[in-house]
Amino acid sequence: MSEGEKIQFRFFSLRIRSVAASVFGTVLLTSCGGGSSVPKNETAPIPPVTQEPRLFRDITSGSGIDFSVGFSENPGDDAEVSFFAGGVASGDYDDDGDIDMFVVRGDVGPNLLYRNDGNNAFAEVAGAAGLAFTKSATENYRHSGPMFADIDGDGDLDLFIGGVQGDPCRVFANNGDGTFTDVTSGSGLDAIGARQTISAAFGDYDLDGDLDLLVSHWRTERSYDDPGDTEHLWRNDSTSTEIQFVSVSVEAGLSPSIITLPDPFVPPSGLDVTFAPSFARVNDDLYPDILMVADFNTTKVFMNNQDGTFSNVTDVDVLTDRNGMGSALGDYDNDGDLDWFVTSIFRETQGTFTNGNRLYRNDGGQFVDVTEAVGVANGGWGWAACLVDLDNDGHLDIYHTNGWREVSDGDFSADQDRAFVSDGAGGFSDRATSLGFTGRGQGRGVVCADFDRDGDVDVFVWKSEATDGGTLYRNETSVNNFLRVKLNGLPPNTGAAGARIKSTVGAVSQLREVALNSNFISQNPAVQIIGLGSAAQTDSLIIEWPDGRMTDMGVVDANQNLLIDHPDL
């Protein structure tokens, strides 16, 4: 992006200085495209289903995105880990308004930093940024689950990368000039002893203002009798000059139960099988709870006690995803709380089908399994997932990637990704083919983000493939209105993780919670896309900040790019 384009974006993305609990009139901003033109003062209800044609187009060729994935294997390595580890982080690391991506792909070559230069063109700049190699000047450790977050609270996105097959984790501080510095040594994260760190999430569980780290460790050996510190939760004790984390899994109450549940299906003895971590405000208070998707029927819910500790409240009769892998959170039924979608394996075993994906509806802070009623179980061998509004009709849809090799009870090597589209009444149908999602193969990670800033959600799929490691789908629906919202939080939580955005049109209210969670070895950016259907404006737009402060924007015209400041900024 040229300097002139950067200035133009800043002008169009007018920063809104907000005041707690104050009411603003309509904010006039230049549209960033993607929505239909509707008279300014005309308000229409959100339609249950968009009738216009929908289309996603594979634009990988010519985008600058081109990579392979590959892991060397040494004695003692777990071959299955190499078949799914790696992944992609997304976020605006250079603060130019575009969503960038950082890709890890084993040790087949350097890590890749794809800088978004606008118009769906990406430049690979990992070498210049200091992120290409982590072991030496020409060698990589084997990594998984990269994550962008403002760890030190200075206003730019730093980078965490997990290590697998016994290789170390790494943390890089953003220097604010397009480069990064490895600050792992002495950070506390250099003490992670887990052999596999698969995925990561960031959130402020203790509400002290900074972002804490939650990680998963699938197939790391732990004693079930006395696992000690399971190394899942790391409290952020950073200062303005130093990134510092402290392991708190034991004192916070996650160890030991995060890796074990006695019934109904015991995992292989002595293994941590956690896959995808999330921070989420499940019971609607300000304190983020912990959701951990895990294999072998060990997915768990930990409620935040608001004193630095958590209680394991997992209901094994409800959380029956059995082979949980991917995770997505969102208010699919527009009732004002966060529901939970978990990917799993749908296959026939001795004439019967295993559970497959699960959709857990949030009822007052307790989850209810509604999978069969809404029709999202059959997703093949599912991995990363997103709950996003693919068509901007005001109802969240589900996208997830999948794939595995041929096994005794099924061949998942050419399975197609799923796009479960909401019917607006609580049900879903898979429309991947008609929408243009034709990809098949070894999908693992997913990023759902507005890469071209036209107000709708595009999709990037990370694949565990020796060639063709990524696919970028551009959203070309362009029939419904939107709001694109980025929150500027109070330092050190500058990205406002944990904040909530509530948009109301007529009788329908939509909830978005800003989160830095794992879809599975992948993350979405903090920028939120809110579909408005044919409505020309919202009746109200309310921000609840992580500290409980409120900003009421009042009526807001559709098709705008909003950057909203915390009241104290």
Image (cartoon, helix red, strand yellow):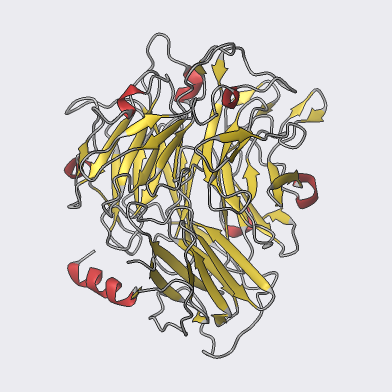
Residue 7 figure quarter: bottom left
Q: Nearer the viewer, residue 266 or 251?
A: 251
Number of marks: 0
Q: Is residue 211 above or below residue 184?
A: below
Residue 546 position, x and y percent, is 46, 56
Residue at 47% in and 77% down? 22
Q: Does residue 565 lie above or below 401 as drawn? A: below
Is residue 379 rendered to the left or right of residue 512? right
Quarter that holds the C terminus = bottom left
Quarter of the rendering occupied by the N terminus: bottom left
The residue under the point 24% across, 42% down is 173
Please indicate, yes or no, whether residue 467 appears anywhere in the rendered image: no
Residue 204 visible here? yes
Q: Position of residue 558 (x, y in %)?
A: 50, 79
Q: Position of residue 512 (x, y in %)?
A: 55, 60
Q: Which residue extends farthest top?
A: 75
In the image, taking residue 553 as reference, residue 176 lies left or right, namely left
Q: Residue at x 26, y 52 (%)?
A: 154
Q: Residue at 27% across / 59% down in the picture?
A: 95
Looking at this rendering, what residue extends furthest in the front direction? 307
Q: Residue furthest right?
A: 351
Find residue 307 and report its horizontal and vertical position in percent: 52, 40
Q: Is residue 442 above or below residue 60?
A: above
